Structure formats: structure tokens, C-alpha cells
Image (tube, rainbow, N blue to C red):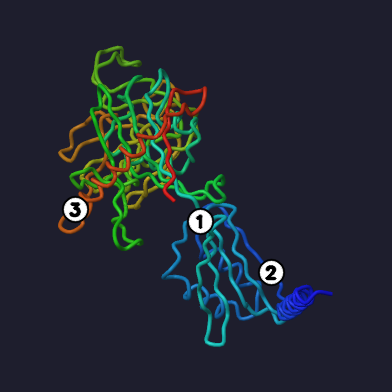
């Protein structure tokens, strides 16, 4: 046998011996898990895990403390938390993986529980989507058709709704979206963010939104703004129903019961009795009651002094003084009071108490960036515009046959 063959065989034996020793040193742990359910946060999952193990309150409390400054929990239904326990059912390891490339791991050591972040390499891409509203279409519907993840579509519509009165938008109005996506193994979508959103329409005008990145990744200032620093906060004005069907608009009309021409100070949305009604923005309930004209009604005062009204309800779910959040269920559609059928009368008073067209109401006032943050935003806006120009230089490809949306993409790494 040649000398080099002997050396190769010895190396092979050494490798096998090391692998054997490594396997022998692997602890015999039992893996336990729990799953995130609707409406839950980490507290709920940790509470159930604590009941599964010995000394759960102390051990899992330390696990949470070890990771609380490094992990921002944005839980989705179906996600799992894993713990490894020894023969005495004491926690030895914890693992939470929000996606295929990121794992938050906490390991018991001689000095206590230690957190570490494990990230697999990803490919980052910038994509510019350009298109126009079609007859009978919505921006949300088009973006979902082209395959943009629902969470990112929600961000696009959320920030643009702060400035754009979409019920007044028309076919032919144009949009441009810049997205940054991360892919694992070049094909599995991991995460993304909306870097830029633009909308221009005949009735609604021209509006842009820029993603601002603060030096502190956990800062509440990480959000979208206009170029001048006006905040476009996603938790802004929402719609009161999941599905909108206008049966009577704001303005003069022939009243369906009296037959007289009167001003209709709101918008009527037709919907079956019992349909859930949502608060359109954060605020405090100032009215929750009944009268013979409005039937069951709720009013919510918002932080800019305006008040939203919800009338003819079959049921009220909040009382005076309650604090509500955007999208919270507050009641159900009905036909109480002076009404010809089940519907929601949705009205809006401005800060001076005057009725206004709800469809023209956009975002509730939010603070502006100023000082160093505003200066940083302006520099980031320049960078974003450069990224748009570079990406627009890539070849344009029609996304699919169901829309005329064009996309241009370039790889960043």
C-alpha cells in the first residue's frame, strides 16, 4: 500500500472516531413544543410551556429575560416554540424560529441561560412594481394578484391611505412600489419591507411614502414618512367593514322614508344583519346608546379631535369611556331606528363638530420628524431615489397575464 493511501486511511479513521465521540456526547433530551393561537402573545405560549416542565416559572422566566433585549416577538398563528428538557424535565434549551433562516436560541450553561442568534445566508433583491388601477380593481387586489405577500400589501395600502382617499381613486391612476425582499436558497421568500410607495391619481393627487431607518432598530420611529417628515403611521384610518358596498353616499338625496330632499351626513354601507363593525382608528368611546332615529349608535373621539359615528347597529360591543384600537370590533350591523333595511351609517365630524364626507377623511394627524432624524430621513430619501433609478435600469418583465403590472429586479448581494 502506498504511503499516501495509508495516510488517507488514518485520517478517515480519525474522522470516524471524532464523529463517534461527538455522537456520544449529544445529551438525551426530550423536545416539547407549543403553538401560537389566534390573538396570543409570547406570554400565553410561555405560560403553557411552564406547566409542562419542572421549575418552569424560574427557568422559562430566565429564558425570556435572556432574549428580551434581542428578540422582537411578532407572532403569527401556527408558529411554534420549542424547548429541550433533560431526564428530570428541566429546561436545557429553547428555540423560536420565525422563518426558515432565523433561529432565536437560548442554552443553559454553567453561568446561566445564554441567548444566541443563528441566521442562515440570504439573497437580497430590490424590485420596482409599476402599474395602474383597472376598472373595478383596487390597489390591494392588484398587488395580491402579482404575488406580493399579503403582509407587505397591507403596509403599502396602510401608509398610502394616510394621504390617499382611495374611494375617490379611478381606473388609470398609477402606482410605483419599491420592495426589498430576502430569499433563502434564492427562491424561498423569507422577509421583505416596503422601501417606497407612490400613487398618483386625477382626483387624489400625487403622494409618496419613504421608509425611514433609525439607528436603533427597535425605535418606534422606524416607519414611513413623506419627504418633508410627516409620519404615515400604519395604525391610521381603517374601513368600518371588511367588505364595502355603498348604498347611499354623502350629500343631498331623496330620503328613502320621508321622500324629502335632505343632506345625508354620512355614507351608508349595505351589509347583512350581524356583520362585524370595526373602529376606523384609535380613540375613546364618547357615545354608546340608542335613539329612535339613529337606533343603536356608537361615537369614537380620535386623537386629532375628530369623531367617527356608527349607526343603526343591531348590537353595541363597547361602552362610553372604552379605549379602542384601529380595526377593533365594536358592534354589528343592523336596522334599528329609522331604517329601511340592514346597513351601517358611517359618519365623521371634524374637530369643530361639523359633519364631513367620511370618504375624504384620510390620516389622523401624527407628529413630524425633526432635528437629526429629519436630516437623516432626507439623506435616506436621496439614497432611495438612487436605488429606484438603478432598479429601473433593469429589464422590465410583465408579472403575469392577469394584470399589466411590470416589475424590474436586481440582486443586492
- Of label 2 and label 1, which has the lower sequence position? 2
The N terminus, quarter of image: bottom right
Instruction: Give the answer, above or below, for where 191 lies relative to 103.
Output: above
Q: Where is residue 80 in the image (x, y as percent from the top left)?
A: 60, 59
Q: Label for residue 179?
A: none
Distance from disc 1 to disc 3, alpha carbons, whole Å, reads 31 Å
Task: Judge whether residue 351 can be spotted in this image.
Answer: yes
Helix, strand or loop for disc 2: strand
Q: Mark 1 points at which residue?
A: 75
Instruction: Give the answer, above or below, for where 132 lies relative to 188.
Output: above
Q: Label for residue 374?
A: 3
- Of label 2 and label 3, which has the lower sequence position? 2
Q: Name the residue under label 2.
A: 31
Mark 2 vs mark 1, foreground winner is: 2
Count neighbours of disc 3 (C-alpha within 10 A) and say few if under 14, some if 14 to 19, many if 20 or more: some
Q: Which of 228 and 50 is in front in this view?
A: 228
Q: Nearer the viewer, residue 260 or 152?
A: 152
Helix, strand or loop for disc 1: loop
Query: Which residue is depicted at the point 23% across and 43% down?
Result: 226
Amino acid at each position: 500500500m502506498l504511503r499516501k493511501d495509508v495516510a488517507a486511511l488514518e485520517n478517515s479513521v480519525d474522522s470516524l472516531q471524532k464523529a463517534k465521540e461527538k455522537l456520544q456526547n449529544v445529551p438525551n433530551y426530550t423536545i416539547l413544543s407549543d403553538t401560537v393561537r389566534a390573538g396570543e402573545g409570547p406570554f400565553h405560549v410561555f405560560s403553557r410551556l411552564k406547566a409542562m416542565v419542572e421549575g418552569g416559572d424560574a427557568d422559562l422566566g430566565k429564558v425570556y429575560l435572556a432574549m428580551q433585549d434581542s428578540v422582537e416577538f411578532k407572532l403569527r398563528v401556527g408558529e411554534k416554540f420549542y424547548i429541550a428538557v433533560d431526564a428530570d424535565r428541566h429546561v436545557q434549551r429553547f428555540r423560536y424560529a420565525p422563518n426558515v433562516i432565523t433561529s432565536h436560541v437560548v442554552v443553559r450553561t454553567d453561568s446561566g441561560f445564554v441567548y444566541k442568534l443563528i441566521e442562515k445566508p440570504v439573497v437580497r433583491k430590490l424590485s420596482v412594481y409599476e402599474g395602474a388601477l383597472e376598472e373595478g380593481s383596487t390597489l390591494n387586489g392588484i398587488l395580491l394578484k402579482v404575488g406580493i405577500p399579503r403582509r407587505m400589501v397591507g403596509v403599502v395600502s396602510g401608509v398610502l391611505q394616510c394621504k390617499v382617499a382611495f374611494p375617490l381613486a379611478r381606473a388609470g391612476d398609477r402606482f410605483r412600489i419599491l420592495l426589498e425582499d430576502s430569499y433563502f436558497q434564492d427562491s424561498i421568500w423569507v422577509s421583505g419591507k416596503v422601501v417606497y410607495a407612490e400613487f398618483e391619481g386625477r382626483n387624489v393627487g400625487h403622494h409618496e411614502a419613504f421608509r425611514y431607518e433609525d439607528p436603533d432598530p427597535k425605535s418606534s420611529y422606524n416607519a414611513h414618512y413623506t419627504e418633508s417628515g410627516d409620519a404615515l403611521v400604519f395604525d391610521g384610518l381603517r374601513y368600518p367593514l371588511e367588505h364595502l358596498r355603498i348604498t347611499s353616499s354623502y350629500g343631498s338625496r331623496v330620503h328613502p322614508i320621508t321622500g324629502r330632499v335632505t343632506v345625508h351626513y354620512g355614507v351608508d354601507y349595505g351589509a347583512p344583519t350581524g356583520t362585524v363593525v370595526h373602529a376606523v382608528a384609535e380613540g375613546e368611546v364618547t357615545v354608546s346608546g340608542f335613539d329612535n332615529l339613529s337606533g343603536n349608535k356608537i361615537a369614537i373621539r380620535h386623537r386629532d379631535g375628530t369623531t367617527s359615528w356608527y349607526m343603526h347597529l343591531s348590537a353595541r360591543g363597547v361602552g362610553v369611556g372604552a379605549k379602542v384600537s384601529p380595526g377593533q370590533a365594536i358592534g354589528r350591523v343592523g336596522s334599528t331606528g329609522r331604517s329601511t333595511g340592514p346597513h351601517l351609517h358611517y359618519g365623521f365630524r371634524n374637530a369643530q363638530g361639523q359633519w364631513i364626507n367620511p370618504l375624504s377623511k384620510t390620516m389622523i394627524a401624527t407628529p413630524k420628524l425633526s432635528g437629526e432624524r429629519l436630516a437623516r430621513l432626507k439623506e435616506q430619501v436621496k439614497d432611495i431615489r438612487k436605488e429606484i433609478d438603478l432598479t429601473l435600469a433593469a429589464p422590465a418583465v410583465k408579472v403575469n397575464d392577469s394584470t399589466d403590472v411590470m416589475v424590474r429586479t436586481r440582486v443586492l448581494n
